[in-house]
């Protein structure tokens, strides 16, 4: 509802870019819902809605980190490779007899470390985020291949599946719980803490943020570390969902995460957007996939649609900047 109301406000302010983004995407969402309901009579059921959220859960969680980085005016191309890398690290650790809880911590640590390294190059090294994260994407994907010899790792204990297959209250998939908790937590952080305000300040005007006393480099490192953390959470969830570790797992997730963020109205210029709406973006992408499956269309059409949405979001974002000027 808030997403649609934002589009209405943009319409009243005669902001073409914002109106196209919010109302246009809302219209697409409504159209897809009606089409899916027409083709699949049981589409709008609690069970199927839970399935859509479950399908969206990994991208939705990765997109939290992507949104934080975009809010600072940066970009992260490494999350998909983080998913594959931590999956291999976790899979090899499980095969070696490491307890599940320790494996989860190891995977999360690997994600945070990759994010910290990217943050160091972006902040202190002054290397463009696009270049740094592109390099990290290649390094992690290659590292995953080296660790496993390019072969998927399998043969894990059965309790691993519980991380994704367990249900709460007898019906709700646990992945829905993960998404709800993490989004509530990040929305609280962004609205009520200094860190949240500093992230917006960095994206709004990094020079002004530095002059106001914000430790810009330190905050950037925190943001990229969180980006790595959320990608690693997605990697653990992927490992539990598949029950095997594939070095190519997560391929393309970085673009889906960025698409979810921009569909949700996170400005690619930084400093503007509500992370809560990123969840809407992730759900719309999942809805598209579900709709394509119901209509027996190849799911790779989702890539085409995601690309179009990103172009649309950039167009809307630029028109929004001109409107404000």
Image (spheres, helix red, strand yellow):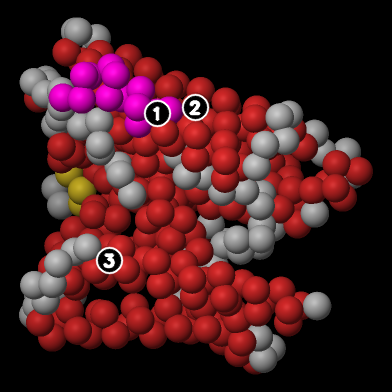
Q: Quick one: SS at disc 3?
A: helix
- Picture coordinates of residue 11 (x, y %)? 60, 90
- Picture coordinates of residue 87 (x, y %)? 28, 28
Q: Nearer the viewer, mark 1 or mark 2?
A: 1
Q: Quick one: SS at disc 1?
A: helix
Q: Earlier in the sequence, mark 1 or mark 3?
A: 1
- Picture coordinates of residue 185 (x, y %)? 51, 45
State the separation of the CA atoms marked 2 and 3: 28 Å
Q: Quadrant of residue 194?
A: top right
Which quadrant is the C terminus positioned in? bottom right
**Residue at which label 3 appears:** 302
- Image-based side of 119 in relation to 261, left or right: right
State the separation of the CA atoms marked 1 and 3: 25 Å
Q: Quick one: SS at disc 2?
A: helix
**Residue at which label 1 appears:** 140
**Residue at which label 2 appears:** 114
- Image-based side of 265 in relation to 305, left or right: right
Few, some or many residues within 10 Å of mark 3 (<14, 14–19, 20+): some
């Amino acid at each position: 509802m808030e997403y649609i109301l934002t589009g209405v406000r943009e319409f009243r302010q005669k902001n073409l870019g914002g109106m196209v983004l919010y109302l246009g995407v809302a219209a697409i969402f409504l159209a897809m819902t009606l089409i899916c309901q027409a083709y699949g009579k049981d589409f709008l059921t609690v069970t199927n809605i839970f399935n859509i959220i479950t399908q969206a859960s990994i991208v939705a969680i990765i997109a939290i980190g992507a949104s934080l980085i975009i809010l600072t005016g940066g970009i992260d191309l490494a999350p998909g490779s983080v998913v594959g890398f931590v999956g291999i690290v976790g899979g090899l650790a499980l095969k070696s007899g490491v307890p599940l809880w320790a494996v989860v911590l190891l995977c999360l640590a690997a994600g945070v470390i990759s994010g910290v390294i990217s943050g160091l190059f972006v902040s202190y090294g002054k290397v463009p985020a696009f270049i740094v994260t592109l390099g990290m994407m290649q390094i992690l994907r290659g590292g995953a291949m080296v660790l496993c010899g390019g072969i998927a790792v399998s043969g894990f204990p059965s309790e691993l599946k519980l991380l994704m297959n367990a249900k709460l209250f007898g019906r709700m998939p646990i992945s829905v719980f993960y998404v709800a908790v993490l989004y509530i937590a990040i929305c609280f952080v962004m609205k009520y803490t200094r860190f949240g305000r500093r992230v917006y300040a960095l994206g709004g005007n990094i020079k002004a943020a530095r002059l106001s006393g914000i430790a810009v480099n330190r905050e950037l490192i925190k943001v990229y570390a969180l980006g790595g953390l959320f990608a690693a959470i997605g990697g653990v969830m992927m490992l539990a969902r598949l029950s095997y570790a594939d070095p190519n797992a997560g391929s393309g997730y970085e673009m889906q995460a960025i698409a979810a963020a921009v569909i949700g109205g996170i400005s690619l210029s930084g400093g503007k957007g509500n992370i809560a709406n990123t969840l809407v973006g992730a759900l719309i992408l999942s809805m598209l996939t579900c709709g394509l499956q119901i209509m027996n269309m190849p799911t790779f059409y989702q890539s085409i649609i995601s690309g179009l949405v990103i172009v649309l979001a950039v167009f809307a974002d630029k028109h929004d900047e001109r409107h404000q000027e």
